[in-house]
Image (cartoon, grey):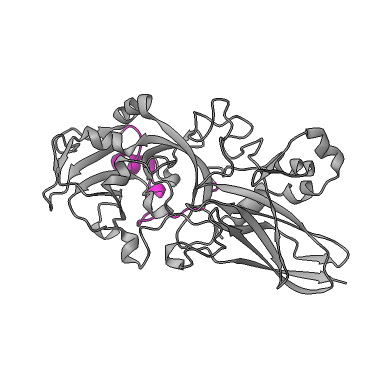
Amino acid sequence: MPTTEDLLHQHAQLTRRYFVGLGAAAATGVALSRAGAEVPPELAPAITNLEYLTHSTKFANFGRGNPPPHTLSPEARRAAGLDRETWQLEVIADPDTDAEVANPLSKDLGTALTWDGLMALAAEHAVCYLHVLTCLNMAGPCGMGLWEGVPLRDVVWLAKPVKNIRRVFYNGFHNDDPAQIFRSSLPIGRVLEDPPGQPPVMLCYRLNGEYLSPERGGPVRMFVPDAYGFKSVKWLQRVVLSNTFQANDTYGEWNNDIDTSLKTCARFLSHPASVRSDQPIPVTGLAQIGISGLSRVQVQVSDGDWRDATILGPPERWGGDVGDRPLPGQPLGFDASHKPQTWPQRFTIAHWAVLLPKVPAGKYVLRCRTIDAAGHIQPMPRPFPKSGRNTIHEVELTVEG
């Protein structure tokens, strides 16, 4: 799990705070919820200093290309159109099909979308939402962020598509080397309309309230909600509207399921490597909430019974680049007072904690799993690893007599 070290650092106080006495917890007067039920107030200290958002510098990084674009010098990035002053985006018809657009956004024609043009759209159409970023082939999240951008559909309509468009292809900078190009695609319907309750596909330019760094794909990247990270192509420079019905995703060429949605699954964050037999076992973790939602998180000691963990409510402190400040902007799914309308939210993470009972001396294996909103137990309903890793997380525990 590439972000374990960072997440453990972020949550260093979680286990200790979880098990402090009732006095400090009672003083906070905070009530959390788990599946709509009230839980004991001693959970309140667990979220006092919780780092929910990942700092933009701490995301697991999967830069592509040789050299990776984010490693280029400032001068080379400027020449490549990878800073805000020189960035341009093309939105054109696929020349290999009969797709038609009346107003192509083209570098050759001098009509490509510039940073100033994007910001003009943002003044009227900007959206932001919480979303976890996860690699399809990694066991844990790359990071959790608040992403801001302009819906892709607003830019597509600038190109005035006319007819014969079924799929949207897009790619980022690739050192002018066709062999290095990294592509992804979406059905035109997903770009123009959002499924109920889901945010839009967008041209993203901010993370946690700050402009995207080169490492995070700046100045502009695609961001596709409900999907794994390979859909959210970095260093975006070109969008092609095509009448081809097949996808052209680079990830598809590597034996991956390119149409999969984010899965629900649980991971451990902190757990003791060893405890005494007269001690209970404190455990914390995170749950990634995918398309199927989240109902419960459970933890097992070896082959014993599965015990429900407490799913923590929204943090009082968001952390990451935001720190102690309220979330910037008006995130989708939040009310006017910046409170989440539901929790946990799909396509984000939630933290959980449990105090397991004492067990006799010996060697044990701890396991954690989720049960989604439809009652499916991880790794169901989609156990196939090439559609997203959601295997049961296991860690070892030694109990000393």
- The answer to if 72 sits in the magenta stretch is yes
Q: Nearer the viewer, residue 101 or 236?
A: 101
Q: Nearer the viewer, residue 388 or 193?
A: 193
> Which residue is found at the position 26% from the left and 39% from the top?
89
Asked if residue 87 shows in the view, the reply is: no
Q: Nearer the viewer, residue 386 or 238?
A: 386
Q: Which residues are magenta?
A: 58-85
Location of residue 242 with respect to 365 vertically, above or below: above
In-image side of 64 versus 243 (left or right): right
Asked if residue 110 shows in the view, the reply is: yes
In-image side of 397 versus 162 (left or right): right
Residue 148 image offset from top left, x and y in percent: 44, 35
Q: Main secondary structure of the magenta part?
A: loop
Location of residue 122 with respect to 227 vertically, above or below: above
Q: Nearer the viewer, residue 39 or 393?
A: 39
> Which residue is found at the position 48% from the left and 34% from the top?
332
- The answer to if 289 sits in the magenta stretch is no
Residue 180 image offset from top left, x and y in percent: 29, 58
Residue 73 image offset from top left, x and y in percent: 38, 44
Taking the view exactly as shown, the residue that stands out farthest to the left is: 98
Location of residue 372 with respect to 54 vertically, above or below: below
